[in-house]
C-alpha cells in the first residue's frame, strides 16, 4: 500500500465495537537504566493513538486496579504477598525468596512494582468482562500481554500473568477460548497454565532453537491429558519475513478456527517479532504484523487484543497504533501527526518508514519446505480433534471485579464524570481534538 492509498479516513464509522484500556500512570514505571523493558513505550503508543483521533472510534476506559483477590485467581498466595510487600528498600529482607520467585536481573524489584502489576492486569480482566457481557467486539489493552509469568514466579520481564487471569474470566461465559501469540518468544506461561485442559487452545508462533528464551515451544509440545493436542506450537527460525510468516499463520489459524470453533479469542501482539527489535530476530514489518490482527479480526469472534514484548520503543508505538487503527476499521496517514513524543520518530516521522533499502540483519532461515512440513503436521493434529469440546450448563461465577458502565471515559454523557475521575485522560483527549 503506497502513501496515496494510506490517506486518512477519519470520518468513517467503525462497524466494530471497540473498547480501549489505558492508565496513564503505567508508563511511569521503570525497570532500570539498562533494562530493555520500557513501560514508557505505552505513553508513546497512547499519545499517538489519541493524536491520530482513533479515540473517537472507540470507548476509552481506565480500569479499576486489580487487587490481591484478583491475582489469587491464578497466582499463589505467598507469591502475591511477596509482590505486594517487596520494595527496593526492603529487598534484602526478602533475599530468601528472590531465587524462589525468580526475581533478579530480568525481573528486578523496582519502585511501584505491585501498582504496575495491578494496572496492566486490570485492563485485561475488565476487558474480558466487557466481552463476556457482549458490550464490545474487541477489547484492547496494550499494557497487558505479559505471557511468561507463572503461578508462583516471575519470568521474562513478566510478574503477573494478566492473560491467564483474563482467560479464566472468559471461561465463565465461553466454552472454548483460543489464545494466539505472535511475540517472538514462546508464550510459555499461558501454555503451562492450560496445558491439561481442552477448554483453552494455545497457539504460539515463535523463535525456537532450544536455546532462545524461554527454550520451550517445540512442535511436539501438544498438551497432556484432556489438553492433548490443544497446545499448538509453531517453532520458527531466524529472519522470517512477512510472506513466509503469513504463509503459515493464516492456514494454521484457519485450521484452528475450523476444528476448534472458539467462542472467544485472546491475541497477544508482542512487537518484538518486528524487524529491528532490540531483542528479536525476525524480519516482520508493521504491516505484516498487523495483517495477523486483521486476519484474526475477520472471523468476527469476540477478541481481546494485548501487547507483550517489544524493545525498540518507537517501533512498538508505531505497530500498536497501526493495529489499533485496524481494530477500528480506520486507515490512517503515514505522516505522523504532531504529538508529545514526535522527536522519537526522527528522521522520517512516518508511521511505517520505508526500510526496503536496508539489508536484513537476519537471513530468512525458514525455507518453504520447512514451513510446509510444519503446517502439514499441525493440521494433521487438528484433524484428529473429532469435535470442539463443550461444557455442561452451570451457574456462572460472579465477575472478578465490578463492572461499572459509567467508567466509559469517552461517552459524551459521562464527559464531566470523566474529567472528575480521570483528569489524565481528559487532558489528553482534549489536546487531541
Image: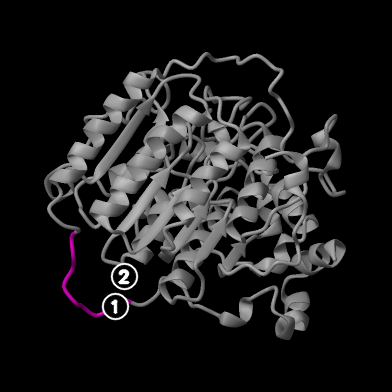
Task: Give neighbour class at mark 2: few <14, some 14-19, many 20+ (Cα, 10 Å).
Answer: some
Q: Return the residue at label 2.
A: 172
Residue found at x 15% / y 57%: 387
- The answer to whether one can see residue 378 in this image is yes
For the question of whether residue 218 can be seen, the reply is: no
Secondary element at tag 2: loop
Q: Residue furthest bottom?
A: 413
How far across and how far down the image is residue 264, in percent?
37, 62
Q: Are the two marked residues, 1 and 2, in contact with CB atoms closer than 8 angstroms?
A: yes
Which of the 4 image quadrants contains residue 191? top left
Classify the position of the C terminus by image quarter: bottom right
For the N terminus, the image quarter is top right
Whole-percent x and y of residue 385? 15, 49
Question: Which is nearer the N-term, disc 1 or disc 2?
Answer: 2
Residue at point 41%, 33% (across, down): 247
Q: Position of residue 285 (x, y in %)?
A: 60, 32
- The alpha-carbon separation of the residues under discs 1 and 2 comes to 6 Å
Relative to residue 272, is residue 125 drawn left or right?
left
- Which residue sits at x=73%, y=46%? 5
The answer to if 61 sits in the magenta stretch is no
Q: Secondary structure at mark 1?
A: loop
The quadrant where residue 318 appears: top right
Is 353 situated above or below 368?
Answer: below
- Magenta stretch holds residue 395: yes
Residue on which the image places disc 1: 396
Q: Is residue 225 left or right of residue 375?
A: left
Overall secondary structure of the magenta section: loop
Label 1: few (<14), some (14–19) or many (≥20) C-alpha neighbours in 10 Å: few
Indicate whether 426 appears above or below 305.
Answer: below
Colouring method of the image: one colour
In the rendered image, residue 8, in percent from the top left (x then y), is placed at 77, 54
- Magenta residues, start to end: 389-397
Amino acid at each position: 500500500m503506497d502513501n496515496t492509498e494510506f490517506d486518512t479516513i477519519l470520518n468513517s464509522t467503525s462497524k466494530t465495537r471497540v473498547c480501549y484500556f489505558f492508565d496513564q500512570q503505567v508508563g511511569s514505571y521503570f525497570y532500570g537504566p539498562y533494562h530493555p523493558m520500557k513501560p514508557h513505550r505505552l505513553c508513546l503508543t497512547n499519545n499517538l493513538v489519541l493524536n491520530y483521533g482513533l479515540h473517537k472510534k472507540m470507548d476509552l476506559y481506565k480500569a479499576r486496579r486489580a487487587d490481591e483477590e484478583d491475582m489469587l485467581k491464578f497466582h499463589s498466595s505467598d507469591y502475591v504477598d511477596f509482590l505486594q510487600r517487596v520494595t527496593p528498600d526492603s529487598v534484602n529482607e526478602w533475599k530468601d525468596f528472590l531465587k524462589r520467585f525468580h526475581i533478579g536481573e530480568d525481573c528486578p524489584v523496582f519502585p511501584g512494582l505491585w501498582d504496575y502489576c495491578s494496572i496492566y492486569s486490570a485492563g485485561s480482566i475488565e476487558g474480558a468482562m466487557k466481552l463476556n457481557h457482549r458490550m464490545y467486539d474487541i477489547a484492547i489493552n496494550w499494557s497487558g500481554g505479559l505471557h511468561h509469568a507463572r503461578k508462583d514466579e516471575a519470568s521474562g520481564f513478566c510478574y503477573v500473568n494478566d492473560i491467564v487471569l483474563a482467560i479464566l474470566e472468559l471461561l465463565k461465559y465461553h466454552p472454548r477460548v483460543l489464545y494466539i501469540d505472535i511475540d517472538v518468544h514462546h508464550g510459555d506461561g499461558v501454555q503451562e497454565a492450560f496445558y491439561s485442559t481442552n477448554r483453552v487452545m494455545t497457539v504460539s508462533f515463535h523463535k525456537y532453537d532450544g536455546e532462545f528464551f524461554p527454550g520451550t515451544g517445540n512442535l511436539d509440545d501438544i498438551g497432556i491429558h484432556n489438553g492433548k493436542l490443544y497446545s499448538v506450537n509453531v517453532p520458527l527460525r531466524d529472519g522470517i519475513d512477512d510472506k513466509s510468516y503469513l504463509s503459515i499463520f493464516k492456514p494454521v489459524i484457519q485450521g484452528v478456527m475450523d476444528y476448534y470453533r472458539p467462542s472467544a479469542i485472546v491475541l497477544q501482539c508482542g512487537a518484538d517479532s518486528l524487524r529491528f527489535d532490540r531483542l528479536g530476530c525476525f524480519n516482520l514489518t508493521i504491516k505484516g504484523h498487523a495483517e495477523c490482527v486483521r486476519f484474526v479480526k475477520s472471523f468476527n469472534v469476540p477478541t481481546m487484543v494485548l501487547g507483550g514484548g517489544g524493545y525498540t520503543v518507537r517501533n512498538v508505538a508505531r505497530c500498536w497504533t497501526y493495529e489499533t487503527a485496524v481494530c477500528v476499521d480506520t486507515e490512517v496517514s503515514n505522516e505522523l501527526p504532531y504529538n508529545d513524543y514526535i522527536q522519537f520518530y526522527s528522521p522520517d516521522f512516518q508511521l511505517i518508514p520505508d526500510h526496503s533499502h536496508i539489508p536484513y540483519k537476519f537471513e530468512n532461515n525458514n525455507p518453504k519446505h520447512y514451513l510446509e512440513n510444519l503446517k502439514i503436521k499441525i493440521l494433521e493434529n487438528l484433524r484428529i480433534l473429532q469435535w470442539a469440546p463443550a461444557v455442561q450448563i452451570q451457574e456462572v461465577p460472579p465477575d472478578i471485579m465490578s463492572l461499572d458502565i459509567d467508567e466509559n471515559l469517552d461517552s459524551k454523557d459521562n464527559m464531566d464524570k470523566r474529567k472528575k475521575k480521570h483528569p489524565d485522560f481528559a487532558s489528553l483527549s482534549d489536546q487531541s481534538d
